[in-house]
């Protein structure tokens, strides 16, 4: 049966690469044989043909009885089934199918988000209002308070490099990184995202940071962990080493963006921030290292940490806002106003986030919901959270497997 899974895996890679030719950006990373990618570029099947091919792959996988497989191969079969199912859903969307926000998220990422009324988050806004007292709208007060932590543009490079180096050092104490792993760093603009990791294969990444909007000192830590260590860079490098190099499981040589893999990737990258900087360690590093490096005067880091903890509790309001906007129930300007209110960001920054929602749709669940699921799973495994994190990052664990 292992040969059966190997054959399906090879055809799954071909399917994914060809979908990537029909939808730019669908393939987030590929580091398999160059000739496979060349073949996909030379003669990609049409979207309807790919839809038929995905159904055929599902049938082939279902014909492989899990009873005849060892535990590792059973998980591999489940992983392939989940990813082919997500590919089928995406192909349906490319042919014009539209699902509700929660249905789409479940079809693509394997988890159904809860959509709460926005009024459920108003109590958190009230707590923030009490934390940042003063005159004027809450958004303006929060913005004025946070202004003390904006990194000057001419200091972005040294601050980001210092933060990434610290994230790497803390990760390397617990996870053995692949030999010769490396990254390049660049600052870009006009993007719907704040940071992106383009994994290149060979344990190398290209990390890009969007410098269009102010970057705060704590955000340097967030991005360093999320895009780098122990986030996307480490995740992709460990998957490549564990599966592609050591096992020869070719399905892991390709990363389709709209797949259950993304919930694990984004969730672990966000949880990795708290894992690398537990308790008040991020605030202390920011105060003692990053702010002086940025040339910033001392400021109330502890109160800002409280503020950010409360803002995190607002994160899932975005799902309701996205659901209303993508369904057409709420217009663009009102959606920007809602995002601004419930993320406490300026309207131009909220407009950038709406651009992200327009581009990636239900992908937004992978950050907050993904982090919470990963954190709960890791902490259920036992006291050595780093060991559990490494196990997750080196596995074919699916979002459904994270649920209790």
Image (cartoon, helix red, strand yellow):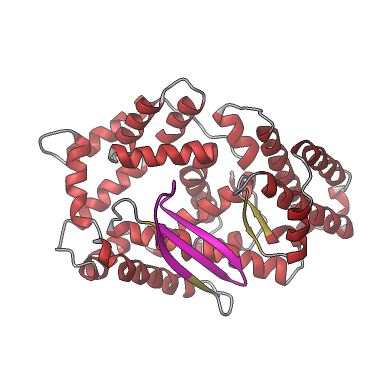
Residue at far top of view = 329
- Residue 255 figure quarter: bottom right
Residue 194 lies in magenta, yes or no? yes
Spot occupied by residue 31 in the image (x, y as percentages of width and height): 67, 65
Spot occupied by residue 326 in the image (x, y as percentages of width and height): 50, 28
Spot occupied by residue 73 in the image (x, y as percentages of width and height): 79, 57
Spot occupied by residue 358 in the image (x, y as percentages of width and height): 49, 36
- Can residue 123 be seen in the rendering of this structure? yes
Residue 113 lies in magenta, yes or no? no
Vertically, is 369 above or below 12? Answer: above
In the displayed structure, does residue 39 sit left or right of residue 127? Answer: right
Residue at far left of view = 135
Quarter placement of the C terminus: top right
Q: Residue at x 49, y 71 (%)?
A: 183
Q: Residue at x 26, y 70 (%)?
A: 289
In the displayed structure, does residue 237 sit left or right of residue 344? Answer: right
Q: Residue at x 46, y 27 (%)?
A: 325
- The secondary structure that dominates the magenta segment is strand
28 and 262: which one is in front? 28
Vertically, is 176 above or below 297? Answer: below
- Residue 101 figure quarter: top right
Vertically, is 358 above or below 393? Answer: above
Magenta region, residue range: 184-209
Q: Residue at x 31, y 50 (%)?
A: 213
């Amino acid at each position: 049966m292992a040969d059966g899974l190997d054959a399906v895996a090879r055809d799954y890679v071909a399917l994914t690469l060809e979908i990537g030719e029909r939808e730019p950006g669908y393939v987030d990373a590929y580091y398999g044989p160059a000739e496979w990618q060349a073949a996909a570029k030379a003669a990609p099947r049409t979207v309807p043909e790919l839809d038929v091919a995905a159904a055929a792959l599902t049938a082939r996988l279902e014909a492989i009885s899990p009873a005849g497989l060892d535990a590792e191969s059973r998980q591999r079969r489940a992983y392939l089934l989940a990813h082919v199912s997500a590919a089928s859903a995406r192909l349906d969307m490319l042919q014009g199918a539209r699902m509700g926000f929660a249905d789409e998220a479940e079809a693509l990422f394997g988890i159904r988000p809860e959509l709460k009324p926005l009024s459920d988050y108003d109590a958190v806004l009230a707590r923030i209002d009490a934390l940042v007292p003063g005159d004027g709208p809450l958004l303006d007060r929060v913005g004025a308070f946070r202004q003390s932590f904006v990194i000057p543009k001419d200091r972005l490079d040294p601050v980001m490099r210092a933060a990434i180096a610290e994230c790497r050092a803390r990760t390397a104490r617990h996870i053995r990184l692949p030999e010769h792993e490396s990254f390049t760093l660049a600052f870009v603009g006009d993007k719907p995202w704040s940071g992106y990791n383009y994994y290149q294969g060979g344990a190398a990444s290209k990390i890009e940071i969007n410098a269009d909007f102010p970057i705060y000192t704590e955000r340097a830590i967030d991005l360093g962990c999320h895009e780098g260590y122990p986030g996307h860079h480490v995740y992709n490098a460990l998957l490549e080493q564990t599966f592609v190099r050591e096992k020869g499981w070719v399905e892991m040589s390709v990363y389709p963006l709209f797949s259950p893999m993304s919930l694990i990737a984004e969730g672990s990258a966000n949880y990795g921030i708290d894992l690398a900087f537990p308790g008040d360690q991020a605030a202390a590093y920011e105060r003692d290292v990053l702010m002086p490096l940025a040339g910033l005067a001392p400021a109330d880091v502890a109160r800002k940490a409280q503020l950010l903890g409360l803002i995190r509790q607002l994160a899932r309001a975005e799902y309701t806002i996205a659901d209303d906007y993508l369904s057409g129930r709420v217009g663009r300007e009102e959606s920007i106003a809602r995002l601004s209110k419930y993320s406490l960001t300026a309207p131009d920054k909220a407009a950038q986030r709406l651009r992200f929602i327009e581009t990636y749709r239900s992908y937004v669940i992978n950050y907050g919901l993904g982090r919470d699921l990963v954190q709960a799973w890791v902490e259920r495994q036992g006291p050595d959270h780093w060991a559990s994190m490494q196990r997750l990052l080196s596995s074919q664990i699916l979002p459904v497997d994270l649920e209790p």
